[in-house]
Image (tube, coloured by chain):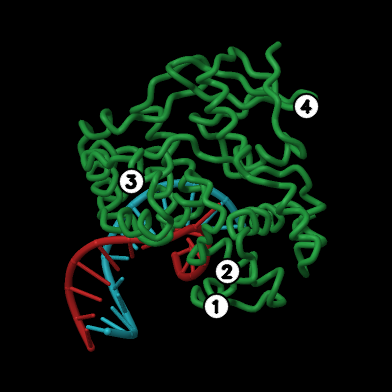
Chain colours: A green, B red, C cyan
Amino acid sequence: MALLEIPQPFDFELSTERFRAFGPDPANLWHEDALLRVVGGREVRIADAPGGVDVEPLDDATAQVVLKLLGTEFDLDAFEAWAAGQPVLDELVPKLRGFRPPIAPDPFETLVTSITAQQVSLFAAFAIRSRMIHAFGERAGEAFAFPTADRLAQATDEELVAVGFSRRKAEYVVGLARAGLDYERLARLPDDEVKAELTAVRGLGEWTADWYLARHLARPRAWPAGDLALRKAVAAFYAGGSDLSIAEVRDMADRFDPFQNLTAHYLLTGARTVAAA
DNA sequence: TACCAGGTAAAAA
DNA sequence: TTTTTACATGGT
């Protein structure tokens, strides 16, 4: 038993909901009430515990990854205080109290995962992604390490097509792996420059760049207005269900400033859980 | 069977 | 410059 404290509020069940919602994810595997992820070649088990999570095995490097993974960078106190004065969110946010949007700790994994999710349903995306991880990732215990850029740089388009990628997406992934982006440098750039650099890469559009800011860099103002699920969630919560264009949703970013990222995650999770109940 | 699903690049107009 | 089209799997 090794306790890793998580800033309160924190609801483990809600914060890991995404890892169960669309099918098993071999790189972030829900197994026997715990989340399994390979860190530094070893499988780490993350389970609910009073005041935080039980992490096994736990060392400093693992703690850094788990803190990132569980969204500890987000300032929930400030968000909740702000949301209390907002329509819609004043009711929704308390229902999801302690929800910390999970952050993808690895930049390459984030981008490849987004490519798999472009255009198709997340159920289809998860199925294809799982086969890719099984084919190219390293197993450690029950879970798999997400395939490295070095490994996928050596893959062929045909190998990715064989696990369900379209030819176009296979080219994107292999091209990205071979592009050798400097992710540490990218992480130090402001939002708009990150977007400009990412969208210069073939296969990475604005939607993918926005989710990179949101899900990997945890930038407070990231707002993936092009996301179909977010558009539907915004429409449901703010427009009585009538369709909203990408431009309309993008123009709503100002009213959520500077909490666009948390707002997007709460609306999406709210649409899947609270609204569905 | 058809159609939609948490887009993108390239062709066509 | 703006508008179409191809892409390809999984669920309903």
Distance from the alpha carbon under mark 2 to that under mark 4: 33 Å
Q: Quadrant of residue A103?
A: top right
* Left or right side of A182 for A67: right
Q: Is mark 3 on a helix, strand or loop?
A: loop
If you read the primary sequence from the N terminus, does the residue marked by circle 1 or circle 2 appear first?
1
Residue drawn 27% across the image and 49% down it: A172
Distance (Cα) linking label 1 and label 2: 9 Å
User: Which chain does the numbered disc 3 sit on?
Assistant: A
Task: Tell me which chain the residue with mark 2 is part of.
Answer: A
> Which image quarter is the N terminus of chain A in?
top right
Q: Residue at x 39, y 21 (%)?
A: A138
Residue at disc 1, secondary structure:
helix
- Secondary element at image label 2: helix
Query: Looking at the rendering, in which quadrant would you find the C terminus of chain A?
Result: bottom right
Q: Which mark is residue A165?
A: 3
Q: Where is residue A38 in the image (x, y as percent from the top left)?
A: 49, 22
Which numbered circle lies on residue A248? 1
The residue at the point 48 percent across, 66 percent down is A226
Label 4 element class: loop
Mark 1 / mark 4, whichever is N-terminal: 4
Q: How crowded is mark 2: few (under 14 residues within 10 Å), some or many (20 or more)?
A: many
Mark with earlier residue (2, 3):
3
What is the distance, in whole Å, between disc 2 and disc 3 at their CAs? 33 Å
Q: Which of disc 1 and disc 3 is earlier in sequence?
A: 3
Q: Nearer the viewer, residue A197 or A57?
A: A197
Query: Where is residue A184, by image quadrant?
Result: top left
The numbered mark, 3 or 4, whose residue comes first in the sequence reads 4
Q: Residue A51 — which label? A: 4
